[in-house]
Amino acid sequence: MKAVRTDIVEPLIKVVEKEKGLVATGIFGFILSAGIALYIFFQGKIILPEGNMGDAFSFNAGIGMFILSIAVILPFAKLGTRKRKTMRWFYITAALYSYAIETVQNFRGLNPRFSREGTIIDMIGGILFGAVSLVLVSLAVILMIQFFRMKPPYERPFLLMGIRYAFLSILLANLAGIWMILLQNRSTGADGNLIVLHGIGFHALQTLILPGLLFEKTQVNERFKKLLIHYGSIAWMLSILLIGFQTALGRTVFELTALPILASLLMLVWFGTAITAAALFIRKKRTYHSFSYSKKLGN
């Protein structure tokens, strides 16, 4: 297969411009988180009886990052105009509702999902929050199927590999989210916390896609690049599975026992492949700039 041509690789900013609504929605999550951080600095994070602004801070930032990542990859899904528009507005609507209930309910001192102190209206809001979460799960499954159905030749093969692995990780994260809904709690056993599994799984939209983007810009043997993406992504997936097993046992992932240590080692394998991709990308850029500078001197 021929190397990816540089004229095929669209600048990231042009891709993002195609999804201005999603980008604005994602940035809004970070603005909310910044405001909440200021509140926490002056007032503390706990609001009785159930509110925790620290949770609202991390949730809004996480949703913001997720929506920005969707804005980047949605143009590559090759959806029809109507389907893409529908998916875009489902994502925007779900994100805005999630921002609102997470922030408002915590400010009111209530758990936005599983309140035991709120009124019937608060309980309905929490149930609707769960339904919105299931909508996000469904959208992720639809996008995953779309990316896996693509047939060669691929215009962006390394990016597509990263996206496919990322959606497998998101599938595990969504299973953790459904687990929390069924439990009406994020805790398992004495020390297990499903939110860790949930959060790390979703970060694959950045961690597993970035190496693919970087490899598109490097002049290295294609087989080598594919192997690195496979090794790094599989290591990430296995690490997520081990975190899931540890959580299912009701134990924290931050203890020095076999499963967390092995999961950390697998994360280091992924990190090594990501660093390799970044180093090759930087080397290629430096070589290009050196060549351009020498050419100018020659002229």
Image (cartoon, rainbow, N blue to C red):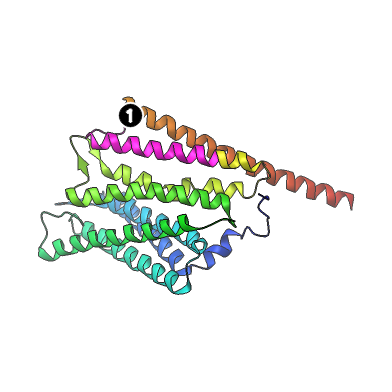
Q: Farthest top residue?
A: 257
Residue 230 in the magenta stretch? The answer is yes
25 above or below 153? below
Residue placed most toward the observer, 160 or 14:
160
Residue found at x 61% / y 38%: 224
Q: Is 283 displayed left or right of 148 in the figure?
A: right
Q: Residues within 10 Å of mark 1 (few under 14, many from 20)?
A: some
- Residue 249 on the magenta segment: yes
| Callout 1 secondary element | helix
Which range is magenta?
228-254
Q: What secondary structure prevails in the magenta region?
A: helix
Residue 217, above or below 244 = below
At 50% from the left edge and 59% from the top edge, which residue is drawn? 72
Decide which of 279, 266 is in the foreground and name it: 266
Instruction: Give x and y (percent) for residue 202.
Output: 38, 49
In the picture as drawn, the residue positioned furthest to the right comes out as 299
**What number of labels is visible?**
1
Q: Residue 90: give x, y in percent of width and height.
A: 35, 68
Question: Is residue 26 toward the left or the right of residue 284 in the image?
Answer: left
> Measured along the vertical axis of the image, is residue 19 above or below residue 206?
below
Q: Position of residue 39 (x, y in %)?
A: 30, 54
Q: Give left or right: position of 106 versus 164.
A: left
The amino acid type found where label 1 is placed reads Leu
For disc 1, the marked residue is 259
